[in-house]
Image: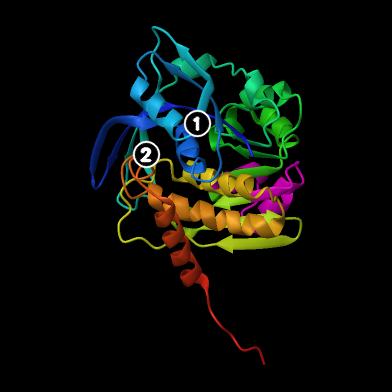
């Protein structure tokens, strides 16, 4: 049931209407690993950090069931750093600082111990890096999930289109789906994107939930209405971690099971936003997850008599 997670491990510095985080641990692979490890182990992590990345953080991930053989540590170089400020609606943010540092020339290497992993999540990195990871795998995983963003659509579209032919599931937000497809209607956008290669498309809509598209089928999962959203950073990656974690745990990649996986992803994302960074994800128990999933069942459950 092993799962490879490829992405950034980084420092974030976040300001929201609720306060300032100071310099904390972030990165797509960090959020995905902390989340998916609740469902399947080992998480085979592939990333790069600088000498400034705390050993205690690596130890904490290892204790959670995350294998770090694929995490490169670059001596005398700093880790990736991002700083941002969220607006009052918590859906929009301004990037204040982006320092790629060790991520700028990252060339991932898949250790032999990771070969044969059944599931692969490619976090938001350059399409060239994502392609290189797929090409290093001797046996194609059962399911490959890809995350990307508008930046790569603007700067590396040809490579992005190439990697889309190599994956099973694409995850983007609604703005990115429209940009990639050139269509405003999300249904039309989905049809166009699915024609580019992936068999499944997930369009994330933040506090408005997520859509799953496959052939002519559509499924909608709501987001849990929360009284306070403290910090949305990493919520999309947490969603991805819950989604792939459930699929890897059940080893069932049918459309029906992906519906459940989207609900699990949404539930995990609802934890992420309750504290800065990975703070809440480090605390949750299996009981917390089960209770949150029950809330989702209640949220969408209804009886109807059709006449």
Q: Disc 2 vs disc 1: which is toward the camera?
A: 1
Q: Which mark is residue 66?
A: 1
| Residue 294 in the image, given as x and y percentages of width and height | 46, 65
Q: Residues within 10 Å of mark 1 (few under 14, many from 20)?
A: many
Query: Is residue 172 toward the left or the right of residue 266 in the image?
Result: right
Q: CA distance from mark 2 to mark 1?
A: 15 Å
Residue span colored magenta: 175-201
Which quarter shows the N terminus?
top right
Q: Is residue 158 magenta?
A: no
Tell me what residue is drawn at x 36 percent, y 20 percent.
55
Tag 2 and tag 1, C-beta contact below 8 Å: no
| Residue 161 in the image, given as x and y percentages of width and height | 71, 34
Tell me what residue is drawn at x 49 percent, y 34 percent.
65
Q: Is residue 182 magenta?
A: yes
Say above or below: 188 vs 162. below
Q: According to the image, label 2 marks what residue?
A: 278
């Amino acid at each position: 049931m092993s799962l490879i997670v490829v992405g950034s491990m980084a420092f974030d510095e976040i300001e929201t209407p609720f306060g300032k985080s100071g310099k904390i641990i972030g990165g797509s692979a960090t959020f995905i690993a902390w989340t998916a490890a609740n469902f399947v182990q080992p998480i085979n992590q592939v990333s790069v950090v600088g000498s400034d990345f705390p050993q205690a953080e690596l130890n904490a991930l290892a204790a959670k069931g995350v294998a770090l053989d694929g995490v490169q540590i670059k001596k005398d170089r700093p880790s990736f750093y991002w700083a941002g400020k969220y607006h009052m609606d918590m859906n929009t943010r301004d990037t204040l600082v982006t320092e790629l540092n060790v991520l700028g020339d990252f060339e991932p290497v898949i250790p032999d111990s990771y070969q044969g992993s059944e599931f692969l999540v490619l976090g938001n990195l350059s399409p060239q890096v994502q392609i290189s990871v797929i090409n290093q795998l001797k046996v194609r995983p059962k399911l490959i999930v890809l995350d990307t963003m508008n930046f790569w659509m603007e700067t590396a579209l040809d490579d992005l289109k190439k990697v889309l032919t190599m994956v099973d599931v694409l995850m983007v937000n609604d703005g990115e789906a429209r940009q990639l497809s050139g269509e405003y209607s999300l249904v039309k956008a989905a049809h166009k994107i699915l024609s580019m290669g992936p068999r499944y498309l997930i369009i994330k809509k933040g506090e408005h939930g997520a859509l799953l598209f496959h052939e002519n089928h559509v499924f909608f999962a709501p987001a849990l209405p929360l009284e306070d959203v403290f910090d949305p950073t990493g919520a999309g990656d947490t969603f991805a971690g819950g989604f792939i974690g459930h699929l890897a745990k059940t080893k069932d990649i049918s459309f029906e099971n992906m519906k459940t996986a989207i609900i699990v992803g949404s539930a995990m994302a609802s934890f992420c936003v309750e504290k800065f960074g990975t703070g809440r994800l480090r605390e949750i128990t299996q009981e917390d997850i089960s209770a949150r999933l029950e809330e989702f069942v209640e949220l969408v459950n209804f009886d109807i008599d059709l006449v």
